[in-house]
Amino acid sequence: IMKRVLICLTSFTTGNGIAKTIMNYYDALIKENYIVDFLLILNLASDPKYLEKIKLGHSKIFVVPDGTKIKKSIATVKLLTKILTQNKYDIIHVNLVQLYAYSCIHTAKKLHVPNIIYHIHNPIFKLPLLKSALVKLINALCKRQSNHYFACSESAGKSVFKNKKFKVIKNLINVKQYEFNEDARNKYREQFGIKQDEIVIGVVARMEKQKNPYFVIDIIKELSKKKKIKLLWLGTGSLKDKMQKYIKEKDLSSECILLEPRNDVNEIYSAMDIFLLPSLYEGLGIVLIEAQASGLPVITSTKVPDDVEITDLVTKLNLQENIEIWVNQLYDIIEKGENKNREKYQDLIESSEYNINNNESLVRLYDNIIEMRSK
């Protein structure tokens, strides 16, 4: 018997963590007789790997037309109404925020989709009063009109769902792909013009306020006074131009390598020496798990959930601390230079619940939801 699910997310761009998580479960869903279709909010270039998979799985992709937020929300309702009227989905799985989430959930409720999953990927973040009130209102409406709740971590779930019951869906990785590789290290360092004696500080993140990019640049500025270093940042976003300008102002152009999202990130971790992510907030921060799988020391903020602390590689620092504390922590790791056996961390991540082979699958959760409904 075929079961139908519509998954709503922002886009299938390379480096989109939510898309990566969903696509890690995709093959299993197809194998278990699920028809999986997708509704994308942003019309951005999709990762060819995902498109290939989706084509093989005979899934449809619907894309909301461009426009302002309000226009796009109206267009989302229109498109979704058409899709839901033509297809009898058992589940709609909403991985969106605010207005877009509400547009999907409200439409699905109105058209009597039996199972509406509201899946959140970030905790509620401190916002200006008016915006905060609006976010709370939209969240309350989304919660009221959904009947199943998913979160990427305990802390993110509690932050939004409070005392409602929710399921934690782990963001999974294929651990073997992130194993440290000396040949890859040499290849990429040569490709990016990194000298033997230069220490590479790596960041894999969108260039958005959440990821605290200017603070990263400030840290690099201070650290470069003590050591020969390179910043290797993989990712793009709305702050890209401003960041490039800031790097120039700080006279760091030759210390910073900014790369667009790409498909070989798993190998590029091998070229790095330390991983840095001083986020203002995170639902989980899957890149921190990937970095540990590659045996990288990780410096992150206390705003990141404890779930990511799988190995002794993780150091968390408070964003209220003086920048010197962050710089000195990085400097100490560089000076110790002890991390010679990076491969040993593979086993720890392999036995963790983030390994794609160990996790309770999305298939089981979907099956349970549909079974509960039919009883």
Image (cartoon, rainbow, N blue to C red):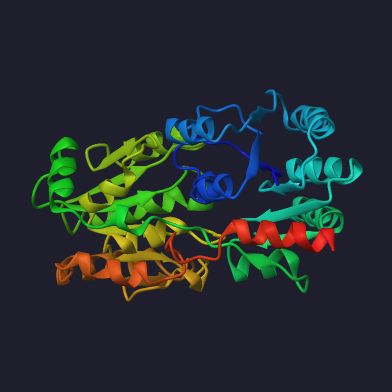
**Residue at x-position 66% and y-position 27%:** 63
- Residue nearest the viewer, comparing 228 with 48: 48
- Residue nearest the viewer, comparing 72 with 328: 72
**Residue at x-position 58% and y-position 49%:** 29
Q: Position of residue 175 (x, y in %)?
A: 35, 59
Classify residue 92 as left or right of residue 329: right
Q: Is residue 124 visible?
A: no
Q: Is residue 73 visible?
A: yes
Looking at the image, the residue that sits furthest to the left is 196
Q: Is residue 293 above or below residue 205?
A: below
Classify residue 143 as left or right of residue 291: right
**Residue at x-position 49% and y-position 68%:** 320
Q: Position of residue 55 (x, y in %)?
A: 52, 30
Q: Position of residue 101 (x, y in %)?
A: 74, 45
Q: Position of residue 375 (x, y in %)?
A: 85, 63
Quadrant in the picture for residue 191: top left
Looking at the image, the residue that sits furthest to the front is 1
Classify residue 366 as left or right of residue 88: left
